[in-house]
């Protein structure tokens, strides 16, 4: 198990999802998860996030410290990924990644479930790993978003994954990593939203969302957060239309 501890000096609010009426920017996780991302690109991502007042930047773990430093005087949160993109890591690795990310300044963790365990019916393995990551997040006043990778699941498996995330006290379920065979669909977002509504979990739609029309369809279906690398273009499109 990890020996690093999350910083406790900076208290983070577990805020409710932003209100779409205030503009779509507050729903966007401005994302750069490409393996060849450079420091220059991460700095640009953070500048854009502050300029457009996105909810967060979502970056790979190696960039969390830099992003946290660049965003420390802004309202933009730092989001990072755990067990990404396959979810097939051992539990201790996911635990260490989470604690290290929180210590480095992350305020949101997007973790990938053990997809093979879910498909094999091993619900306890899935629930227990989500629970461990979610517990570390709560201790660090951070949000835990659970990536279930809808493209690889049946509808029944998606529902089970959502229920396991709720039982494990996660804060969000998320459709996709963006690295599988498909990204977010309106149908999946609607299914996830219906399933988690009674537990008041958020729904993050991610993967293939590139236009304002794409984002609005996901929000209408129940998404409370949008993960996209096209956030700047989406907000510019919204503003050009008068909001």
Image (cartoon, grey):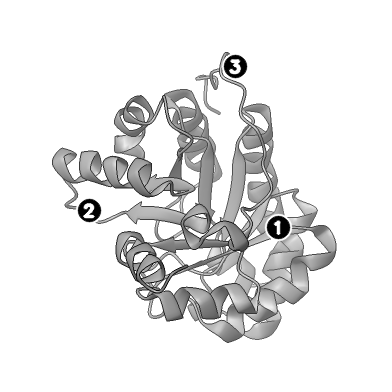
Q: In this view, does 196 lie to the left or right of 222?
A: right
Determine which of the numbered discs, if any, sits on residue 8 in the image.
Answer: 3
Residue where numbered disc 1 is placed: 165
Callout 2: helix, strand or loop? loop
| Mark 1 residue crowding within 10 angstroms, few (<14) / some (14–19) / many (20+) | many
At 52% from the left edge and 44% from the top edge, which residue is drawn?
109
| Mark 2 residue crowding within 10 angstroms, few (<14) / some (14–19) / many (20+) | few
Residue 189 seen by the camera: yes
| Mark 3 residue crowding within 10 angstroms, few (<14) / some (14–19) / many (20+) | few
What is the distance, in whole Å, between disc 2 and disc 1 at their CAs? 27 Å
Q: Where is residue 178 in the image (x, y as percent from the top left)?
A: 38, 68
The image quadrant that residue 203 belongs to is bottom right
Residue where numbered disc 2 is placed: 35
Quick one: label 3 or label 1, which is nearer the N terminus? 3
In the foreground, 24 or 83: 24
- Vertical order, 107 against 27 (above or below): above
Q: Position of residue 210 (x, y in %)?
A: 35, 73
In the foreground, 170 or 24: 24
User: Contact (CB < 8 A) between labels 3 and 1?
Assistant: no
Which quarter of the rendered picture does the N terminus lie within?
top right
Residue found at the very far front of the displayed protein:
242
Q: Position of residue 136 (x, y in %)?
A: 63, 33
Residue found at the very far right of the displayed protein:
198
């Amino acid at each position: 198990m990890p020996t690093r501890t999350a910083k406790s000096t900076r208290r983070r609010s577990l805020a409710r999802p932003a209100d779409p009426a205030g503009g779509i920017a507050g729903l966007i996780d401005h994302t750069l998860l490409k393996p060849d991302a450079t420091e220059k690109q991460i700095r640009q991502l953070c500048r854009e996030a502050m300029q457009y007042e996105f909810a967060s930047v979502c970056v790979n773990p190696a960039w969390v410290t830099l992003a946290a430093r660049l965003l420390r005087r802004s309202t933009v949160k730092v989001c990072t990924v755990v067990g990404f993109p396959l979810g097939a890591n051992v539990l201790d690795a996911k635990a260490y990644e989470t604690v290290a990310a929180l210590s480095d300044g992350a305020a949101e963790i997007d973790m990938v479930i053990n997809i093979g365990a879910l498909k094999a019916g091993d619900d306890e393995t899935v629930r227990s790993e989500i629970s461990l990551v979610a517990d570390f997040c709560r201790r660090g006043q951070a949000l835990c978003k659970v990536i279930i990778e809808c493209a690889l699941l049946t509808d029944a498996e998606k529902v089970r994954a959502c229920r396991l995330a709720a039982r494990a006290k996660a804060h969000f379920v998320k459709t996709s990593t963006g690295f599988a065979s498909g990204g977010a669909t309106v149908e999946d977002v609607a299914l996830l939203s219906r399933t988690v509504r009674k537990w008041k979990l958020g729904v993050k739609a991610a993967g293939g969302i590139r236009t304002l029309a794409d984002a609005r369809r996901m929000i209408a279906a129940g998404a409370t957060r949008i993960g996209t690398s096209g956030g700047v273009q989406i907000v510019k499109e919204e503003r050009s239309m008068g909001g």
